[in-house]
Image (cartoon, rainbow, N blue to C red):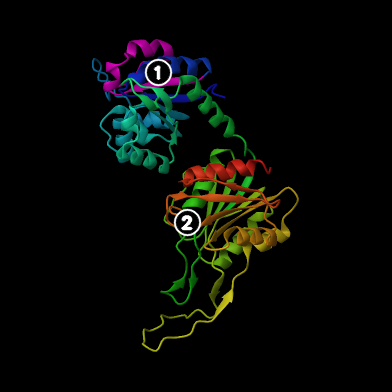
Amino acid sequence: MLKGKKIVLGITGSIAAYKSAYLVRLLVRKGAEVQVVMTPAAREFITPVTLSPLSGKAVISEFFTANSGLWHSHVDLGLWADLMLIAPATASTIGKMANGIADNMLITTYLSMKAPVFVAPAMDLDMYRHPSTTHNLELLKRYGNHIIEPASGELASGLEGKGRMEEPEQIVAQLERFFSAQLDLKDKKVLITAGPTYEKIDPVRFIGNYSSGKMAYALAEACADRGARVELISGPVALQTRHPAIHRTDVETAAEMYEACMHYFSAVDVAILCAAVADFSPENPRPSKIKSNKEGFGLSLKPTKDIALNLGNVKKPGQVLVGFALETDNEIENARAKMERKKLDFIVLNSLNDQGAGFKADTNKIKILEPGGKVLDFPLKSKQKVAEDIVNHLITKL
């Protein structure tokens, strides 16, 4: 799975840098093309003379070559690579990555990287569990980076604990699994709804909700990364898509989202209904602004069309329909009833009672419910990681 892949290997100033030579050799044996980028501190632990023959390329550690003045373009590296791996990654480099401190070639390359980024931390156990390190790692996860958890064992300090860089064989295995998963949605078409809907009361006011669209956009990127062509129908959100395989249709109202879903649904293999669609809209929106007064006014509401119910009624054999439920009480019972009523293949439940889950947050905690009664419970994770869990489950239905 690594044959022909272009990999930027970033090496930082850790005693674990000695493992990088073996890591380069393993990647090259698997058929990958490896470009090593080192921090100045990394050169204190392992030399470019060791790494260059193994990779077959000159090692890059500075912006300019000292004797010729040749400029090494971090932008070009960001466009060239299929993947960036930083192993070992010290606490210092992790902090710079998390906070955009671009003071060396490796960090500028990371900030320019268009490809997925994997980070393999390596440090003493107290440094690894320090709040600043855990915070920075959480930021990197939220940015969409993949963290290769360090192993537990004897550390360079002589202490025992978690913090040693994962072994090169295990790192390579993770990269192979990543690339093999890239194609498991190839040639599939996926419809995803995102964000809130706004139902106008007058030209100024509307009925809406707190949905940010972050979960749906993470799902769109995850599906596209794994080979799918994604039709993203988005309510009003302040988010942008990254992957070129995502086609975005912007809507505002529940009626517009309904029409877009009905238009695209017949041509897709999967529909993931992640949007927080309004259940009601004003019956008679005012054409001009309602003037403020102390007497108040009445607002008559009418139900909107139920997108999931209508798609469930026209679903063809082989199509997969996935719903979301955000509940505050009787959570599993309410979610299961929704799944059965709307003929969903499975439903993703999240609760406002779980800290770190729900609207606006960068994290989520979900349960996946299946028609047979099975419930899969997942811990709190970044929404990017939650998206991976959902897509992994989706694959089992195709």
Task: Label 2, secondary structure: give it.
Answer: loop
Image: 329 above or below 108: below
Residue displayed at 70% across by 58% down: 343
The residue under label 2 is 358
Q: Where is residue 236 in the image (x, y as percent from the top left)?
A: 46, 61
Does the magenta run of residues contain 251? no
Residue 389, image quadrant: top right
Eyeballing the image, is 154 above or below 98? above
Q: Choose between 211 and 228: the one closer to the eye.
A: 211
Give how far across and how far down residue 272 sits, in percent. Answer: 60, 52
Tell me the residue at 47%/56% (across/down): 358
* Residue found farthest to the right: 317
Q: Is mark 1 on a helix, strand or loop?
A: helix
Q: Which contiguous range is marked in magenta? A: 32-61
Q: Going 42% across and 40% down the picture, which residue do you hit?
A: 141
- Mark 2 crowd level (few <14, some 14–19, many ≥20, 10 Å Cα): many
Mark 2 vs 1, N-terminal side: 1
Q: From this viewpoint, is residue 243 visible? A: no
Name the residue carrying label 1. Answer: 20
Callout 1 amino acid: Ser
- Residue 258 location (% of width, % of height): 60, 63
Q: Which of marks 2 and 1 is in front?
A: 2
Which is nearer the eye, 79 or 268?
A: 268
Q: Is 362 in front, or is 116?
A: 362
Q: In this view, does 113 lie to the left or right of 61?
A: right
